[in-house]
Image (tube, rainbow, N blue to C red):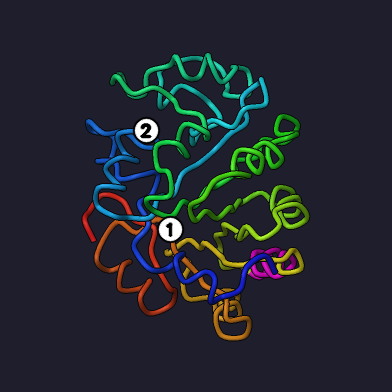
């Protein structure tokens, strides 16, 4: 295991702003410096996403394709970090930051939960690059991914950094897949709030005493569900 429960009290101590404290992409867009500054100002933990650009630099961006967030063509792994940094997000003045730029901006003021976005065949070096960016970072940070090959790589290489599984679903095959990942030194789980409660989350909390955070909470009902079945929420669209 990469971190003990006691060492992870910071993970669940405050609500987690999904992709930063954005305003549902009206004027302050997700995964931008403006959204991260707003989260720091409100003292929320920050959740963000990173992809690997073509020059091997992790950039803070959710989608593999560029269209929704920038109006551009192509995929993120076809662009260098400098090319990504020149793109405007949502037609605003905000540009796509690198992970290193995000770390410099936050500088330990609030915890970071970084989701690594794998793209099969185009993400070689993502884990090493993220860990390299974090090697001298002084603040609290945790790493997680949906992608099992990324989680396995993190489990081998992350040292004392906490590693989490991002997960969804409630079918028997989903449960089997999630349970299989417990052999990779998980420190926490991030689970789809719409699929709570379930046997995997109950086992993780009750038998392994690991924290569970939820995604993505957008209303009071799901906030209450988080309080009942998990330890903290990843939220957007309202002020908890």
Q: Is residue 56 above or below residue 118?
A: above
Quadrant in which the N terminus appears? bottom right
Q: Secondary structure at mark 2?
A: loop
Mark 1 or 2: the one toward you:
2
Q: Quadrant of residue 77?
A: top right
Residue 21 screen position, x and y as percent: 30, 45
Residue extent of the magenta highlight: 172-181
Q: Which residue is mark 2?
A: 32
Residue at horizontal 62 percent and vertical 85 percent from the top: 207
C-alpha separation, residue under disc 1 versus residue under disc 2: 19 Å
- Chief secondary structure of the magenta portion: helix
The number of callouts visible is 2
Q: Secondary structure at mark 1?
A: strand
Residue 237 screen position, x and y as percent: 26, 49
Q: Is residue 157 above or below residue 232?
A: above
Mark 1: few, some, or many residues within 10 Å (few <14, many ≥20)?
Answer: many
Residue 79 screen position, x and y as percent: 59, 17
Residue at horizontal 38 percent and vertical 68 percent from the top: 13
User: In this view, which residue lies farthest toward the bottom?
Assistant: 207
Task: Please state if 118 lies on the left or on the right of 138 as rendered.
Answer: right
Q: Is residue 220 above or below residue 197?
A: above
Q: Which residue is mark 1?
A: 215
Q: Is residue 23 above or below residue 85?
A: below
Quadrant in which the C terminus appears? bottom left
Task: Please state if 211 lies on the left or on the right of 148 as rendered.
Answer: left
Report if residue 102 lies within the magenta region: no
């Amino acid at each position: 295991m990469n971190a003990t429960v006691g060492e992870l009290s910071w993970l669940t101590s405050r609500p987690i702003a999904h992709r930063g404290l954005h305003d549902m992409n009206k004027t302050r867009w997700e995964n931008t410096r403006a959204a991260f500054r707003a989260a720091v100002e409100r003292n929320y933990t920050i959740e963000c996403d990173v992809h690997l650009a073509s020059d091997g630099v992790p950039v803070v961006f959710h989608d593999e394709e560029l269209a929704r967030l920038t109006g551009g063509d192509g995929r993120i792994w076809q662009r260098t970090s400098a090319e990504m940094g020149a793109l405007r997000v949502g037609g605003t003045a905000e540009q796509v930051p690198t992970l290193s730029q995000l770390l410099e901006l936050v500088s330990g003021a609030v915890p970071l939960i970084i989701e690594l976005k794998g793209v099969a065949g185009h993400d070689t070096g993502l884990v090493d690059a993220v860990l390299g960016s974090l090697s001298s970072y002084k603040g609290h940070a945790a790493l997680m991914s949906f992608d099992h090959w990324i989680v396995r790589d993190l489990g081998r290489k992350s040292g004392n950094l906490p590693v989490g599984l991002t997960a969804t679903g409630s079918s028997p095959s989903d449960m089997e897949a999630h349970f299989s990942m417990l052999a990779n030194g998980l420190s926490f789980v991030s689970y789809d709030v719409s699929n709570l409660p379930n046997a995997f989350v109950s086992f993780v909390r009750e038998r392994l005493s690991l924290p569970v955070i939820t995604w993505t909470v957008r209303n009071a009902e799901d906030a209450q569900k988080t309080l009942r079945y998990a330890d903290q929420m990843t939220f957007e669209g309202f002020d908890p």
